[in-house]
Amino acid sequence: MEDPAAPGTGGPPANGNGNGGGKGKQAAPKGREAFRSQRRESEGSVDCPTLEFEYGDADGHAAELSVQGKEWLELEEDAQKAYIMGLLDRLEVVSRERRLKVARAVLYLAQGTFGECDSEVDVLHWSRYNCFLLYQMGTFSTFLELLHMEIDNSQACSSALRKPAVSIADSTELRVLLSVMYLMVENIRLERETDPCGWRTARETFRTELSFSMHNEEPFALLLFSMVTKFCSGLAPHFPIKKVLLLLWKVVMFTLGGFEHLQTLKVQKRAELGLPPLAEDSIQVVKSMRAASPPSYTLDLGESQLAPPPSKLRGRRGSRRQLLTKQDSLDIYNERDLFKTEEPATEEEEESAGDGERTLDGELDLLEQDPLVPPPPSQAPLSAERVAFPKGLPWAPKVRQKDIEHFLEMSRNKFIGFTLGQDTDTLVGLPRPIHESVKTLKQHKYISIADVQIKNEEELEKCPMSLGEEVVPETPCEILYQGMLYSLPQYMIALLKILLAAAPTSKAKTDSINILADVLPEEMPITVLQSMKLGIDVNRHKEIIVKSISTLLLLLLKHFKLNHIYQFEYVSQHLVFANCIPLILKFFNQNILSYITAKNSISVLDYPCCTIQDLPELTTESLEAGDNSQFCWRNLFSCINLLRLLNKLTKWKHSRTMMLVVFKSAPILKRALKVKQAMLQLYVLKLLKLQTKYLGRQWRKSNMKTMSAIYQKVRHRMNDDWAYGNDIDARPWDFQAEECTLRANIEAFNSRRYDRPQDSEFSPVDNCLQSVLGQRLDLPEDFHYSYELWLEREVFSQPICWEELLQNH
């Protein structure tokens, strides 16, 4: 389990689940040299093998759960239900100690009654069985009430605020409750073909309970969001934020759906809107991609230094033959794997990365500040690269309606001297090749769901009376957005603050929030072994937080975009205003290869392994050894999600793309290409493609291997002049106007759909005299005392001109 609760303690073991390997920052003098040696090896070699990583909604079931006689397994189901009912009755006692003891007994059942099992498979089986049984007996509702009590426990909050340092002991009750709820959500959401009919029904009922407001209460995800903001505001520093974020992520994934379910919903919605089906399944296309070799540094730089300058080549006879010969040698050279060893980056790249890091640090001092409109970028050349030609293109090209209109506008201005606006059908006066071009563009025309939603919104704004009131389906996504709407800026800022504190590149600051309250012990370690163990736990703790937040934000953006484009844009703008873009770039401004291969886990303490096997004696050597995994699943998963999040924020937004350029993201992203994993490389290349037109000719000339990889792996837009920088969209003006226009459209959408005052000018008027006189009006309690005085002043003493009244009507 990402977030285990140790048997009998209600809290995580020293190192609960591990979705990765096992070495963190070492505190032992003996292990320091080995750690430095490993770090030099990881930083000094790009011989990274292709990572066999399968991207999905979450890691394997056992990894996600990496959280006494054989009497329970031998009981009949009725007896088990009776025992659970007895436990739930005992949870209603006043004594906190007795409630905690019973809650731990429920936790033991949710963990699979491991004391009676002989294998890890048995533990996982009984954990799942018991969680369904606990849900059917109403355990989740009972624990939800207890969670409300703990959240409102002012005594615990004030006690934590008075302490100089909050420790794991301050959140024992909360951690027990959240662990049980996490186990239930994670086990019940997992679908298997062998599930009985009763389990399938229970799953759908549970999903509905979590998605909608039940018994006049808000959806469960909003309660968890409120815990996050309360923690970040400093009012509840003892909240176990890692467990809260893990549960929040799994609840959102369970209620709204994971990535594959999103693809299914997208297909259904396109069919409902009458749009043509998708050309390909993006998930399957990405899975079939192969990782490419990363770009090289020193070798290409050396050749560029040895080669004569272009001015001398122009005057030489036979220079064309020399260049062709050189190209032939490049093609032969590219057939081999060039990157057996990693060469250091060029001085210019290091300087750019250093400047970028200083800029990022300045931007992230206050997350709440608005981003500045970036100035035009400076054109900085980087190292030259090899050219590798693709064998086939994985994506079908797309063309927007705007692209066709822009192409026809340029063609009409050139050939007939005037334009016809948005008319894409009239081709009179244009030469035949233009006709063929327009035909080809229309064959690949792609109309997105967002295009339809924007058009419908424009029509509703123009004709609110004739089109009538919009019918909004009450889907789980719509309910969640309505609940988050008015506090959404605070939610986004809180999540980014926690992400900043958990980033490995963040520097400790006195005013930063303490995210280690649920991992630090009451007494700090006094031995080398204890220090190493705590260091691994702290690193693992941060990695799980990064994983939870990155996936949560990505799921919210994708679901809101499918539900309505302006819901997506609203969340995106607040993320951008809270400096999410420099935050993600700061995260990647590290040795990503080392981060992905980090082994901050102790495998013998992972759930369910720790519940079955006798725990061996831990030594500094065993902690340094770690496991034999090739990479850390959760860290690679987090990196991919952060890159996808960055793509979501910057796609088709030129002002935000300019932020990537100003923060010198190109060398940072380019270093991430050293990781030989196809999906990660794809999203890095997408981000590089966005900004190539702004980076200048020299950068493109010096990075031809990267340009070739973009051509090979990223989808083509037929009119996109990304490789040459001649696109009119590359002009660096009106970027602030772009964001302001978008913000106005978002506010108009939210106001029209969610702000409906009764005194609006479009509200219906009641013209029936009897109906109006029959309405009950709320009058002050003392009105009857002054009723006669009111009649005299407001009725009898006011002259009535009946002739004028008749004339007006």
Image (cartoon, helix red, strand yellow):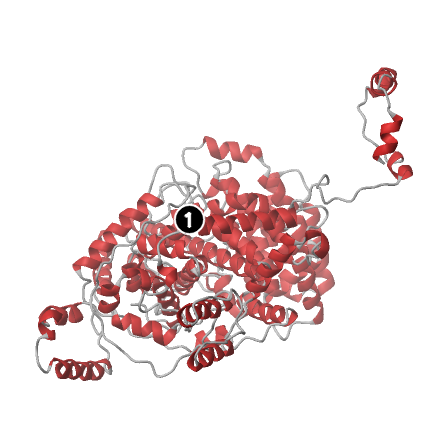
Residue 797 x, y percent position in the rendering: 85, 16
Residue 128 picture quarter: bottom right
Identify whether 686 is placed above or below 13. Answer: below
Residue 578 x, y percent position in the rendering: 43, 46
Q: Nearer the viewer, residue 203 or 70?
A: 203
Q: Is residue 207 left or right of residue 291?
A: right
Q: Residue furthest right?
A: 770
Residue 23 picture quarter: bottom left
Residue 786 picture quarter: top right
User: Is residue 67 something that shows in the picture?
Assistant: no
Callout 1, which amino acid?
Answer: Gln
User: Is residue 693 something that shows in the picture?
Assistant: yes
Residue that badge 1 annotates? 736
Identify whether 661 is placed above or below 512. Answer: below
Q: Nearer the viewer, residue 671 or 178?
A: 671
Q: Nearer the viewer, residue 469 or 27?
A: 469
- For disc 1, the neighbor class at 10 Å (few under 14, some 14 to 19, many from 20) is some
Q: Is residue 360 left or right of residue 637?
A: left
How many numbered circles are shown? 1
Q: Quadrant of the C terminus?
A: top right
Helix, strand or loop status at disc 1: helix
Residue 172 x, y percent position in the rendering: 52, 44
Q: Is residue 805 left or right of residue 428?
A: right
Residue sitting at x 59%, y 64%: 452
Q: Nearer the viewer, residue 221 or 384?
A: 384
Residue 380 x, y percent position in the rendering: 22, 58
